[in-house]
Amino acid sequence: MCPCHPEQYVKNLSELSGRKGLADNLFEELGIAARQTGTPSLDDMERLTEEFLVGKANVYGSVSFYDFLKPENRGKKVYVCNGSACLTAGTQKNLSDKLADHFPASEIGTMCCLGRCHENSAFYYDGKITPALPWNK
């Protein structure tokens, strides 16, 4: 593969990951493998390289790129947005401190941009992105 044409590489990987259809694709399977611990195990990643006929670097690259799959987010229950708008607003330190009252530090992670820039103080918890602390309602 010519390194001067990365768009072809992305196109090829996308086609390989979805060649079994939308319901059975590599990225969906990585998410399923990550459900229990927050990141796929090495055994799961190895299995998926064989199942989808992609290289180990492709699977590891995907896992290390997406916040929900990163190994450093293993065991996290709540994620604080660390996107530039939230950080610039200066609200995330206060939010992290409040979350620390309810979660051990080992369960608090960060995620780059949750798409709630206009609300600031965004975080992800229990399958939802929220700008308000649920226990303050």
Image: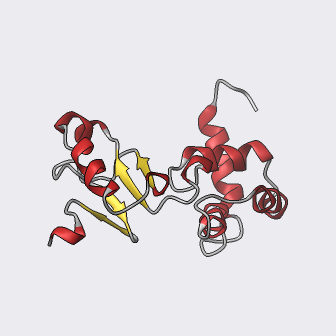
Query: To which quarter of the image does residue 24 belong?
Result: bottom right
Q: Residue at x 58, y 61 (%)?
A: 38
Q: Is residue 118 left or right of residue 58?
A: left
Residue extending farthest to the top is 4
Q: Check the image and report above or below for 36 versus 93.
A: below
Q: Nearer the viewer, residue 116 or 51?
A: 116
Residue 11, how many percent across, how many down? 62, 47
Residue 81, how many percent across, how many down? 33, 48
Q: Nearer the viewer, residue 34 or 90?
A: 90
Q: Check the image and report above or below for 64 versus 104.
A: above
Query: To which quarter of the image does residue 116 belong?
Result: bottom left
| The C terminus - image quarter | bottom left
Q: Residue at x 62, y 43 (%)?
A: 10
Q: Residue at x 23, y 39 (%)?
A: 85
Q: Is residue 89 left or right of residue 106?
A: left
Q: Residue at x 77, y 61 (%)?
A: 48
